[in-house]
Amino acid sequence: MTISINVNTVERSFDIQPGEVLLDVLRREGYLEVKGSCHSGDCGACTVLLDGRPVASCLILVAKADGHAVTTVRGIGDQAHPHVLQEAFVKNGAVQCGYCVPGAITSAKALLDENPDPTEEEIRLAMDSNYCRCTGYEQQVEAVLDAAAQLRKGDKK
Ligand code: FES
Ligand code: FES
């Protein structure tokens, strides 16, 4: 079966097998910035935006994404044009091994799109499905607060 998904603003067609999940198809097709770990919806490493909402791509049958838009962390920003969240994660020491970071930034992006001035508690709640074994979470919360403040000032987009 062939399906179409808009990935990072590019229309793509994918040949899929019954039962395949979005995470596995994205990685097979080269979107290696989307990480997999638990494959059971627990760790948040595989978070992408599906029509702007954060989802665990390991839990989404890829057929359900047919005709929809997926944004990976590379669609949020890349090395040449990093998003303010990505810069803030680096600046605030929120990247150590880095494995959780694509998912964490994706969840944070969804939060800031809806709520440009979140409290620390709202940030922790929005990112409570994104496990991080390295940072102790403090730096990631600081990074999101920092990015939100910069976005509100209009310094960055
Ligand atoms: S790999 Fe999807 S939530 Fe862990
Ligand atoms: S930076 Fe290593 S798991 Fe988060």
Image (cartoon, rainbow, N blue to C red):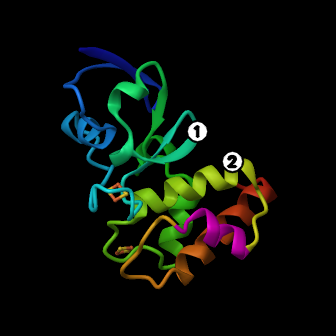
Count numbered badges in the picture. 2
Assign ligand 1 to one image quadrant: bottom left
Hey, what amino acid is under mark 2? Asp
Write down the region rendered in magenta: 120-128
Q: Position of residue 32 (x, y in %)?
A: 26, 47
**Quarter of the image where the N terminus is located:** top left
Q: Bin the neighbour count of mark 1 within 10 Å (Cα to Cα): few under 14, some 14-19, many 20 and up.
A: some
Asked whether the viewer can see residue 77, the reply is no
Q: Can you say whether 132 is above or below 71 in the image?
A: below
Q: Position of residue 96 (x, y in %)?
A: 36, 77
Q: Main secondary structure of the magenta part?
A: helix
Q: Can you say whether 25 is above or below 106 in the image?
A: above
- Mark 1 or mark 2, which has the lower sequence index? 1
Q: Which mark is residue 52?
A: 1
Label pair 1/2, CB-CB below 8 angstroms? yes
Asked whether the viewer can see residue 97, the reply is yes
Q: Name the secondary structure under disc 1.
A: loop
Is the shortest distance between ligand 1 and the CB of mark 2 under 8 Å?
no
Tag 2 residue: 113
Seen from the viewer's position, the closer of residues 152 and 20 is 20
